[in-house]
Every structure is written in C-alpha cells, then in structure tokens.
Amino acid sequence: MASSCIASPAALCRPRRQRLCRVACSAADAGESAETGLLMAARKNAGRLACGVLAAWAVASSSNPVIAAGQRLPPLSTEPNRCERAFVGNTIGQANGVYDKPLDLRFCDYTNEKTNLKGKSLAAALMSDAKFDGADMSEVVMSKAYAVGASFKGTDFTNAVIDRVNFEKADLTGAIFKNTVLSGSTFQDAKMDNVVFEDTIIGYIDLQKLCTNTSISADSRLELGCR
C-alpha cells in the first residue's frame, strides 16, 4: 500500500487508504514540565493540531506505565466518595502523575456515564476492575493510569490522551479511539474486538506492539495498518 511521508525531524507516514498517523522516529524527553504542557495542549486541541506535532510528542513520552502488572498496589481507599472523585479528576498531576492523594477508582461503576468524566484528568488513577462501559471519556487525559482488568466496552475515547496506561486483561470491546493520542500503553491479553481506530495518533513501535493482540478484528487491523 502506497504511503506519503513528510521529510522532517519527526518523519510521519500516513497510508493513503487509512486514516492513521504513524510515527517512525524518536525524540528526547524534554522533561516533565514540557511534557505536561504538550499533554494539555493535545487534550484541548487534538482535533485541530497538526498530526506531526502530536506524533512527535507521542514518541517522546513513550515509556512504561507507572505501575507494572504484578506490582503491589496500595490498600483500597476507604474514602466514602472515592468513586465521585473521578468527576473532579487529578487536578495536580498531569503527564507526570503527581498527586496529593491517590485517585482510587478501583471497582467503581461508571457504566453509561455520559457527562461527568468528559475532559477530566485521570492521571495516575488506579482503575483496575472498574466499569466504564458505554461512558463518554472523550478528551480525558489518562497518563500513567493502572487499568488492569477494567471494563471499557463501548467507551468513547475521542480526542483523548492515553499515555502509558496499563490495560492488561481489560475489556475494550467496541471502544472508540477516534483522533486519540495513544502512546506507551500496554494491552497484554486485553479484549479488543471491534475497537474503532479512526485517525488514531500512535507511534510506530507502539503500533507494532498493539498489532500483536490477536483479539483485534480484521477491520480494525486494516484501519491500524497491521501487517
């Protein structure tokens, strides 16, 4: 399949028959403060910024999720309104995941939540075994979040920034990653049937790793450009 490339420090390829940005370069990490600024710019302007700018940022920020699978997690929060804290989000940490207290959303149920999660920062959130089925999570910033075993069936991640999130064994069936920055995240053993990847902004190495997930449907693999 023919593709066109832009000769620049952040070489970018876009297959002509697919709506996908591919990054085939690397960039040095400019530090947490610069990363945070770019992250928020991506969240607010993902639908308008040039693909090359976002793609370069995606490669620069690609690294392991903040909490690896099997790593010991803190005890479940006993705060009575801990699930409602998602509607406020992490107001301190952005890309760096700094927080005054953990954003503990484990086992919370946000099924079909259409209003209160949109555009929130869920950086460094503990989301394992939570339910976000059918939720509108467009424009959210999920950086260094731990979502092992969580359910995102039919979740809308349009214009979101999904950076270094651990989705191991999560159910992402029918999730929508439209114009979404998807960098440094892991999807080991995740269910990804009928996931929509429309204009997804993803690094080349991340794309290669994502394509190893055998649950991705044939149409989604074609949309991604998996070989």
Image (cartoon, rainbow, N blue to C red):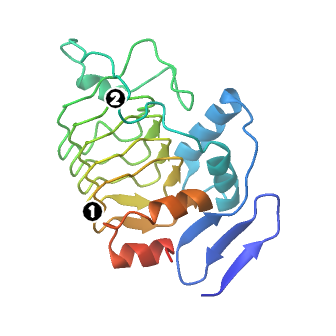
Q: What residue is pinned by disc 2?
A: 126
- Seen at 54% across and 84% down, the residue is 17
Residue 159 visible in the snapshot: yes
Picture quadrant of residue 127 = top left
Residue type at mark 1 is Gly
Mark nearer the N terminus (2 vs 1): 2
Picture quadrant of residue 36 = top right
Structural crowding at the residue carrying mark 1, measured as other residues with C-alpha within 10 Å and reported as few (<14), some (14–19) or many (≥20): some
Structural crowding at the residue carrying mark 2, measured as other residues with C-alpha within 10 Å and reported as few (<14), some (14–19) or many (≥20): many
Q: Viewer-nearest of labels 2 and 1?
A: 2
Element marked by disc 2: loop
- Seen at 40% across and 13% down, the residue is 101
Residue 153, image x, y percentages: 23, 54
Q: Quadrant of the N terminus?
A: bottom right
Residue extending farthest to the right is 8
Q: Nearer the viewer, residue 196 or 184?
A: 184
Callout count: 2
Residue 111, image x, y percentages: 17, 44
Q: What residue is pinned by disc 1?
A: 174
Element marked by disc 1: loop
- Seen at 57% across and 27% down, the residue is 96
Residue type at mark 2 is Leu
In the image, taking residue 33 as reference, residue 6 lies left or right, namely: right
Establish if 130 lies above or below 207.
above
Q: Nearer the viewer, residue 64 or 223?
A: 64
Q: Nearer the viewer, residue 192 or 19?
A: 192
